[in-house]
Structure formats: structure tokens, C-alpha cells
Image (cartoon, grey):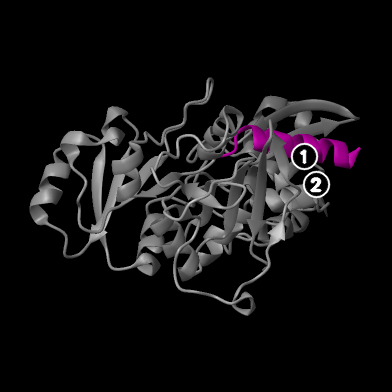
């Protein structure tokens, strides 16, 4: 039954994915005599962790029970006390977890502390759980956000036809799926040209999901006009990233707008750590071609989500997914590919770097 209860803890973590950043989403289940006493997930950063909430719900019955966690319990003081303390105080006799927390502040220390307290600890690895926590581990170890590039394209790789009317290449089911993906990210990144040409809102518009990822616009010269910007039609936060040499007067105009911040940066290699320090651990790049190419050629895209519509476009003046210099096949790499997913004819392919 260990796998059953551990899988339940994992699905509790999935239930709240994207709402706990910069913390990982964690699920926990308290079991005794094959009866579930309590279950919980970590609600938000600064709030009690899943293990603590589950043990509180179980109360005195948690004594001699088994605690199942999707992630190794923490052993360090952060915004909340270490989970290992609560586990010991509850009299839990056994802890089963799936993924070791690769945060250097934990990284095996949680289970070591529990064992030294006389608690039986077992790790049962589950590929799906490791996959789920990979972006968190990546960001905490590299001290930069995990970067997803989401691309909507035709079957021959075109993201924008000659008339620049790319709304919508993919279908409404794919659009709804993208909103769920956005809700799991801390920020959405686009270029200034995409804002000017497409007039997007870049918000999460899914019933039942209240999430406002930061809208990040890379606008090196501050050419966007705050008097005619579609992003200001909603109240989700906006971060405009510009060059050190951008106009101070244009910056002043933007700073008069509500929910808008300006960040000056020198290059992508300095921008990403700055975003991480702002608590943005997972970001999604949504275009256009210049921005995709910038992140791709810099080597900072960790995952590609290619949403392929069953359409073919001809012509010469269209935009492919990537621009940049000419390459030979020997200069490219092969990626790990998840099983493709179909949404009413559209095909979603997820490519990850081989690490």
C-alpha cells in the first residue's frame, strides 16, 4: 500500500502546483492501520508545510502512524520551522517519501535527522514525482528560473504568416491548456513587438483558477507606449525589462502606471538571476521569434512546449520558430521527448534538454 498512499500525496501536490512559489508544492498523508487519518498540501509560501498541516489534522491519532510525503521533509528554519520537528513531536513512527529535496539546505539532511530521532524512514522513488520537482531543483541549484518556451506553430514550423495574423494558429482546446500551464508559472515573458502587434493580455483565464503570473516584457529601448498597451487592461503585475541606456523619461511614464515595475539589465545572463531573486522560479517565454531565438541561442531554454496545429502555410515572408545564424545538423542537439499529447487535432510535444 506504500505506493498507493505515496501516489495520493503526489496528487495532492499536483492539485496545488504553481501556487506555492518559490517553495515546491508538496502533499502529505497520515495513515494508521491502513486508514487515512488526514491529508494536506502546502497552500502557499510562508504558510505551514503539508506535513505539518496533515499532522495537525490527525491530532493525537498521529502517534505511531506513518506519514507519506511527496518530497523529503525539510530540516531547516525558513519562514516556518523545520518539518522534522513537527514529525518527531507528533510521535510518528515511520516516514515514507519519494523525492530527495535537492535544495542544498536539505539534500538528505531531513531523512538523516528523522533517523537520528528513531523514526523509520523509507524512500520510494517515483519517476513522475522526480519529473514534477525537476524545475524546482533546477532553479534552486542554478539560482535562476526554470525556462519554458511555449510555441504555437503550424505543422511546417511557422509561428506567424506574412499578414502577421497568428491568432489563433492552434485551437481553443490548446488555448485552454496553455492557461493551465501559465497558472503553474511565476511569469510569462514576451518581447515588445509581440505586445504591439498581438495586443495580448497574458493572463490566466481559466474558471476556478485565481493566479496572476507576472507579465515580463523585454523592451530594450522602452518603445512601448503606456497610453496604448493591452497589458494595462488587467491588474496582473507587469515587469518591463529594458537596457541601461533606455530613456529615463519613458521610464518615468511607466512608473506612473499601477502594478508596473521597471528593471534595467545588461544581458540575459544577468536578467535571469535577477528574476530569481524576485522569487520567480519558473517562467514561460511566449514569443516572438526574436525572444525565442535570444533564449535559445543563449542556451537558457530548459523545456520547449511545441503546440503544433494541423495546418500548412506557404509563402516567403513568414516567421519560423527560430531565427539566428545558419546551422548544420552537427551543431544541433537531440532532446528528451515526452509522449505527444493530442488536443482535438493539435499535437503538444514537450522537449527537454538531456542532462
Q: Residue at x 78, y 26 (%)?
A: 37
The disc label shown at residue 96, or none: 2
Q: Which residues are magenta?
A: 1-18
x and y percent of residue 177 in the render? 59, 33
Label 2 and label 1: CA atoms lie apart by: 6 Å
Q: Quadrant of residue 181?
A: top right
Earlier in the chain: of badge 2 and badge 1, it is 1
Q: Is residue 349 above or below residue 5?
A: below
Is residue 4 covered in magenta?
yes
Q: Residue at x 53, y 56 (%)?
A: 146
x and y percent of residue 115 in the render? 77, 56
Q: Left of 139 or right of it: where is 75?
A: right
Residue 75 in view, yes or no: no
Q: Single out the residue that lies furthest toward the front.
A: 315
Residue 263 in view, yes or no: yes
Label 2: how many residues lie within 10 Å, few (<14), some (14-19) or many (20+)? many
x and y percent of residue 294 in the render? 42, 64
Say whether marks 2 and 1 touch (CB < 8 Å). yes
**Camera-side residue: 144 or 148?**
148
**Camera-side residue: 257 or 191?**
191
* Quadrant where the image shows the N terminus: top right
Label 1: how many residues lie within 10 Å, few (<14), some (14-19) or many (20+)? many
Label 1 element class: strand
The residue carrying mark 1 is: 67
x and y percent of residue 66 in the render? 82, 39
Amino acid at each position: 500500500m506504500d505506493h498507493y498512499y505515496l501516489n495520493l500525496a503526489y496528487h495532492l501536490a499536483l492539485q496545488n502546483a504553481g501556487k506555492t512559489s518559490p517553495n515546491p508544492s508538496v502533499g502529505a498523508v497520515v495513515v494508521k492501520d491502513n486508514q487515512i487519518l488526514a491529508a494536506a498540501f502546502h497552500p502557499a509560501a510562508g504558510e505551514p508545510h503539508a506535513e505539518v498541516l496533515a499532522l495537525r489534522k490527525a491530532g493525537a491519532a498521529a502517534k505511531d502512524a506513518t506519514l507519506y510525503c511527496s518530497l523529503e521533509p525539510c530540516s531547516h528554519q525558513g519562514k516556518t520551522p523545520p518539518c522534522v520537528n513537527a514529525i518527531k513531536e507528533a510521535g510518528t513512527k515511520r516516514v515514507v517519501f519519494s523525492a530527495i529535496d535537492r535544495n542544498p539546505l536539505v539534500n538528505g539532511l531531513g531523512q538523516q535527522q528523522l533517523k537520528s530521532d528513531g523514526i523509520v524512514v523509507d524512500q520510494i522513488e517515483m519517476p513522475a514525482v522526480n519529473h514534477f520537482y525537476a524545475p524546482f531543483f533546477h532553479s534552486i541549484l542554478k539560482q535562476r528560473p526554470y525556462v519554458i518556451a511555449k510555441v504555437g506553430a503550424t505543422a511546417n514550423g511557422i509561428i506567424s504568416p506574412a499578414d502577421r495574423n497568428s491568432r489563433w494558429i492552434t485551437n481553443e482546446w490548446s488555448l485552454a491548456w496553455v492557461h493551465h500551464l501559465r497558472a503553474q508559472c511565476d511569469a510569462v515573458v514576451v518581447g515588445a513587438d509581440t505586445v504591439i502587434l498581438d495586443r495580448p493580455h497574458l493572463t490566466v483565464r481559466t474558471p476556478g483558477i485565481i493566479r496572476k503570473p507576472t507579465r515580463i516584457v523585454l523592451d530594450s529601448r522602452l518603445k512601448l507606449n503606456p497610453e496604448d498597451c493591452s497589458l494595462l487592461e488587467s491588474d496582473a503585475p507587469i515587469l518591463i525589462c529594458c537596457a541601461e541606456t533606455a530613456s529615463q523619461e519613458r521610464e518615468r511614464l511607466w512608473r506612473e502606471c499601477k502594478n508596473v515595475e521597471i528593471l534595467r539589465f545588461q544581458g540575459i545572463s544577468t536578467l535571469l538571476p535577477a528574476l530569481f531573486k524576485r522569487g520567480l522560479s519558473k517562467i514561460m517565454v511566449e514569443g516572438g521569434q526574436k525572444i525565442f531565438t535570444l533564449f535559445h541561442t543563449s542556451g537558457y531554454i530548459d523545456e520547449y512546449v511545441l503546440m503544433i496545429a494541423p495546418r500548412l502555410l506557404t509563402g516567403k515572408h513568414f516567421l519560423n520558430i527560430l531565427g539566428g545564424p545558419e546551422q548544420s545538423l552537427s551543431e544541433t542537439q537531440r532532446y528528451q521527448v515526452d509522449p505527444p499529447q493530442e488536443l482535438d487535432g493539435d499535437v503538444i510535444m514537450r522537449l527537454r534538454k538531456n542532462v
